Image (spheres, rainbow, N blue to C red):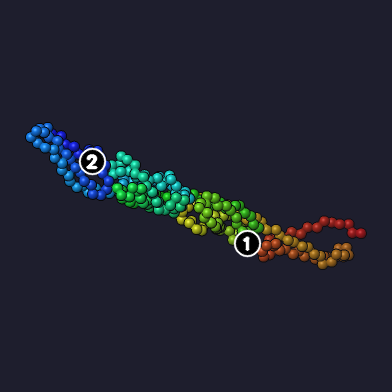
Amino acid sequence: PGAFTYTPATGSILAAGANTLTVTFAPTDTADYTSQTASVNLVVIAATPLINWTNPAPITYGTALSGTQLDATAATPDGSTPVNGTFVYTPAAGVVLSVGTQPLSVTFTPTDDVDFTTIKKTVTVDVQAATLVVTANDATKIYGTSNPTFTGTITGAQNGDVLTENFTTTASTLSDVGTYDIVPSASGTNIANYVQTIKDGTLTVTKASVISSLSLSTTSIAYELPVTMTVTIKSATRSTPTGTVLFSEDWMKVS
């Protein structure tokens, strides 16, 4: 029987590398036994830190990466003690990701690069499409004329994307008087990152005016002699319209 004294003591955390452990035995019976010291060598391998980082919540296209997504922490392998160091993220904060499941990675370099190793971890973030509202303004035109230049608005563009509005309609130069849909759509850089909400406009085709002129074969005639009346009909926008012309006369006193 006796007492053992260890160096380093129980509970000590050894540095990475070669370490010497010693023990001194002090016998209870010091008359018959002497104290004795022994040593062994122990190689401590650098620990791999535990990176705490889970998949971030989904974000909408146009949201720049920030500390909300890039929030990894490091700890000792058992998770009990934080480990200081530097986190380098790829992509970095401020980057706007395209729609889809995108990888995020971090490389952690510990301040204590003797006892801890550098480690990399990857997670994913779900980037959802942004909503683009594409609206066509109402327009009018006269029957027989070409379609006007359609206008509209695009709201919801993100990340400085430059988008162009396009329009389609079934109305043509020969379309009858009535109403027709103006259907807008958007195109341009990163358009795949959007869900388009379309708000149609209405093209109203109105009646074309008719221009008429009346001429007489003579403007001065004897009583009861015939006179020829000639009317000319034309459209302000297209070919001569067809139809019926009604003539009427008011009796006038001849002087």
Q: Reply above or below: 148 against 16.
A: below
What residue sits right under mark 2 in the picture?
A: 8
Looking at this view, name the residue that lies furthest to the right. 255
The reply to whether dot 2 and dot 1 touch (C-beta < 8 Å) is no
Residue 116 in the image, given as x and y percentages of width and height:
30, 48
Residue under the image location 18 percent in, 37 percent down: 5
Residue 66 in the image, given as x and y percentages of width and height:
45, 47
Q: Which mark is residue 106?
A: none
| The C terminus - image quarter | bottom right
Residue under the image location 35 percent in, 50 percent down: 109
Neighbor class of circle 2 (other Cα within 10 Å; few <14, some 14-19, many 20+) is some
**In the image shown, does 153 or 190 lie closer to the viewer?**
190
Any part of residue 93 in sight: yes
Residue 169: name its quadrant.
bottom right
Q: Reply above or below: 187 against 69.
A: below
Label 2, secondary structure: give it. Answer: loop
**In the image shown, does 98 or 185 lie closer to the viewer?**
98
Tell me which amino acid carries mark 2: Pro
Residue 48 in the image, given as x and y percentages of width and height:
29, 48
Q: Earlier in the sequence, mark 2 or mark 1?
A: 2
Looking at this view, name the residue that lies furthest to the bottom. 217
Image position of 16 (left or right of 167): left
Mark 2 or 1: in front is 2
Label 1, secondary structure: give it. Answer: loop
Looking at this view, name the residue that lies furthest to the left. 32
Any part of residue 52 in sight: no
Residue 233 in the image, given as x and y percentages of width and height:
72, 63
Tell me which amino acid carries mark 1: Ser
Mark 2–mark 1 distance (CA, rounded to whole Å): 95 Å
Neighbor class of circle 1 (other Cα within 10 Å; few <14, some 14-19, many 20+) is some
What residue sits right under mark 1 in the picture?
A: 146
| The N terminus - image quarter | top left
